Image: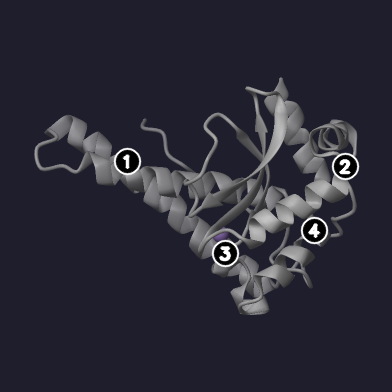
């Protein structure tokens, strides 16, 4: 059987992150937008399978792998995003993540400021991303434009903030800054810490 991407359930109810993120946003974001990326990635895989069987004549490999990169990256980032949040989240990280943030950013406040600015200043649609870079064995803050652009290859996202308009517009209108400032109230540090431990192993 060919492998396919699968939409994960939200790990909480649609209204669980209120008042930071409304029930309506969560429902549309997960049920429509994330599903769209799953379906788009699978459609690209199917097209490529078909072309391998029937021939590549007249088939646009470049456009299809571009679709695959966009949609599969969207799926991966959203899957991380849902678990990076939780009701009654916020506060500060503990565990190895806290130590790494202190070592790699010089403290939590500097890290939080850097990721907030990165998220607020993404050009058009994208993400603020805390990633683990195995080359330097350290955390770094990067941006993703759309879902796939500006990646540091090999670096694994640990904590991501979606700043596409679909992530906040129904509630925050054009005020991305307010959304990012409030987002920290639902951060799930235990999840980010688990992700860092896993990727380091
Ligand atoms: Mn999104």
Label 2 crowding class (10 Å Cα cut-off): few <14, some 14-19, many 20+? some
Q: Determine if the C-beta at disc 3 is less than 8 A from ligand 1.
A: yes
The residue pinned by badge 3 equals 29
Q: Which mark is residue 65?
A: 1
Of 121 and 67, which appears nearest the observer? 121
Q: Residue at x 62, y 79 (%)?
A: 173
**What is the CA distance from the residue labelled 4 to the residue labelled 1?**
34 Å
Residue pictured at 70% horizontal, 48% vertical: 83
Residue 25 percent location from the top left of the image: 62, 71
Q: Are marks 2 and 4 in contact (CB under 8 Å)?
A: no
Label 3: which secondary element: helix
Query: Of the residues under marks 4 and 3, which one precedes in the sequence?
Result: 3
Dot 3 or dot 1: first in sequence order is: 3
Q: Nearer the viewer, mark 2 or mark 1?
A: 2
Q: Which one is earlier in the sequence, the residue at label 2 or at label 1?
A: 1
Q: Where is residue 180 drawn, in percent x and y?
A: 72, 64
Provide residue 106's location: percent of width, then percent of height. Answer: 85, 39
Ligand 1 contact, mark 2 (Cβ < 8 Å): no
Sequence order check: which comes first, mark 2 or mark 4? 2
Q: Nearer the viewer, mark 2 or mark 4?
A: 2
Instruction: Report how far apart the C-alphas of labels 2 and 4 lie in the structure.
Output: 16 Å
Which of disc 1 and disc 4 is earlier in sequence?
1
**Residue drawn at the location 45% of the way across and 44% of the way down:** 72
The image's mark for residue 107 is 2
Ligand number 1: quarter of image: bottom right
Give SS at disc 2.
loop
Q: Is residue 169 visible?
A: yes
State left or right for residue 94 relative to residue 39: right
């Amino acid at each position: 059987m060919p492998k396919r991407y699968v939409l994960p359930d939200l790990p909480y109810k649609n209204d669980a992150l209120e008042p930071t993120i409304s029930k309506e946003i969560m429902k549309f974001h997960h049920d429509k937008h994330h599903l769209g990326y799953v379906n788009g990635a699978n459609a690209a895989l199917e097209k490529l399978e078909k072309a391998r069987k029937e021939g590549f004549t007249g088939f646009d490999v470049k456009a299809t792998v571009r679709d695959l990169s966009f949609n599969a990256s969207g799926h991966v980032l959203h899957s991380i995003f849902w678990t990076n949040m939780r009701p009654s989240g916020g506060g500060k990280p503990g565990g190895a993540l806290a130590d790494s943030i202190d070592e790699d950013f010089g403290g939590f406040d500097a890290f939080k400021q850097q990721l907030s600015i990165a998220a607020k200043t993404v050009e058009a649609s994208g993400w603020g991303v805390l990633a683990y870079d195995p080359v330097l064995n350290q955390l770094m803050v990067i941006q993703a434009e759309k879902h796939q652009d500006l990646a540091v290859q090999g670096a694994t996202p640990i904590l991501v903030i979606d700043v596409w308009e679909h992530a906040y517009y129904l509630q925050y209108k054009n005020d991305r800054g307010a959304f990012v400032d409030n987002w920290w109230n639902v951060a799930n540090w235990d999840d980010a810490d688990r992700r860092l431990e896993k990727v380091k192993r």
